[in-house]
Image (tube, helix red, strand yellow):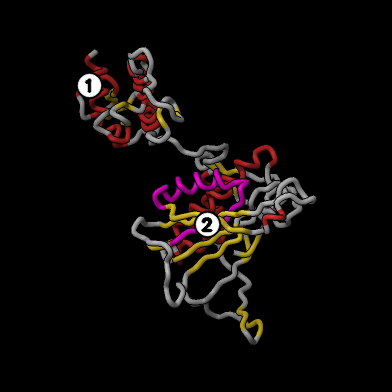
Amino acid sequence: MMLLHELKTTLKKDERLVSDDKLLKNRIVELALKLDKDLIKLLLSNKRIKDHFFTEVDKILVFDKEKFMKFVDNKEFLPDSYTSFKNKIGLTADKKYIAKSKEVVLSWPYKDCILEGGQEKEDEKRKEIFHNEILASDEIDRLLEPKVFTNFKRISAKGEQGVSEIKPTDNLIIKGNNLLALHSLKKRFAGKVKLIYIDPPYNTGNDEFGYNDSFNHSTWLTFMTNRVEIAKKLLDETGIFATQSSFHEYAYLKVMLDDLFHKENHLCTFNILVRHPDRVLTGDKEFNDVIEYILFYRVSPDTKFPVTTHPPPQNLLLMKLYPISQWL
């Protein structure tokens, strides 16, 4: 089948669509649904493909993506051998080995949403709203646009004083919704922060993170992703990001941060002894954490660790990422 052969040959020119010299069908469908411009250019480069999947309307070419995806889903795109599995044992996703696949990502309900996280008190039972990136773009724009900071106080050895000017070298303690505060800091501090350390809720079931019992785990991941994405934009090219976690969310947090910062930028993980080993089994609960984890990431592969500067860098951001209004 000439068209099938030409389509396969053409698609293999895009390295995003190939693994082990085999086409990644799901990746092709994903990019076709998004009307990826590089994929469209590639398809238009072949006359036979162009004539088959594009229609001219008033001198404008229209891509028939439904026809294209039906063609790609044809059984001819599948391996024609008796079995499609290699002589190898390993974890796979859509018959692609995870170690080789370029498509494996951590997914969860509401990943494409913004979670405000705006309850005022620890015992408040707020019905949290997830703002979808597409359906609620106006609401998200209003939520994340810079806010005016008020009620400034300068605290020194002389006590509280009035504030007439905020200097770039001033240390700031900001009390409020940390998502709103981070986006409000972006214009002034984007690309300027040397180190960010966050202390998020551990999602143990007993801490202040009590949102949405039906999707508590995915809520936590959405909450964290929203904040880490904007925090990363504040770091400069030599910046370091660190966050602490218990075993409750460590594994998912690691995969999420690998996705946001890229796996090769994971510098190390510190195992911190937070309790004496004799306290593992006590009467207050079934199991007590003895070890907690601090994950370190860099923005640029050129950054070495540990980073030692004398004097210490001026721009550091320490965040207490509780869902309640908290110090930032």
At a point 60% along the width and 79% down the height, the residue shown is: 154
- The answer to whether residue 17 is left or right of residue 275 is left
Tag 1 near tag 2, CB within 8 Å: no
Residue 6 got which mark?
1
Counting residues from the N terminus, which is met first, the one under dot 1 or under dot 2?
Answer: 1
Q: Which class describes the residues within 10 Å of circle 2: few (<14), some (14-19), or many (20+)?
A: few
Between residues 94 and 147, which one lies in front from this camera angle? 94
The answer to whether 172 is drawn above or below residue 272 in the figure is below
In terms of image quadrants, where is residue 147?
A: bottom right
Q: Nearer the viewer, mark 1 or mark 2?
A: 2
Between residues 140 and 2, which one lies in front from this camera angle? 2
| Amino acid type assigned to the residue bearing label 2 in the image | Phe
Q: Position of residue 209 (x, y in %)?
A: 67, 50
Q: Position of residue 1 (x, y in %)?
A: 24, 13
At a point 65% along the width and 39% down the height, the residue shown is: 215
Q: Position of residue 129 (x, y in %)?
A: 63, 44
| Amino acid type assigned to the residue bearing label 1 in the image | Glu
**Where, quadrant-wise, is the C terminus in this rendering?**
bottom right
On the image, numbered disc 2 is attached to which residue?
270
In terms of image quadrants, where is residue 72?
A: top left
User: Is residue 245 part of the magenta span, yes or no?
Assistant: yes
At a point 68% along the width and 46% down the height, the residue shown is: 211
Magenta stretch bounds: 240-265
Residue 177 got which mark?
none
The answer to whether 46 is drawn above or below residue 310 in the figure is above
In terms of image quadrants, where is residue 67?
A: top left
Tell me, yes or no, if residue 236 can be seen here: no
Task: Please identify the residue farthest to the right as the structure is shown.
Answer: 283
Classify mark 1: helix, strand or loop.
Answer: helix
The answer to whether 47 is drawn above or below residue 108 in the figure is above
- The answer to whether residue 120 is left or right of residue 257 is right
Q: Position of residue 238 (x, y in %)?
A: 38, 63
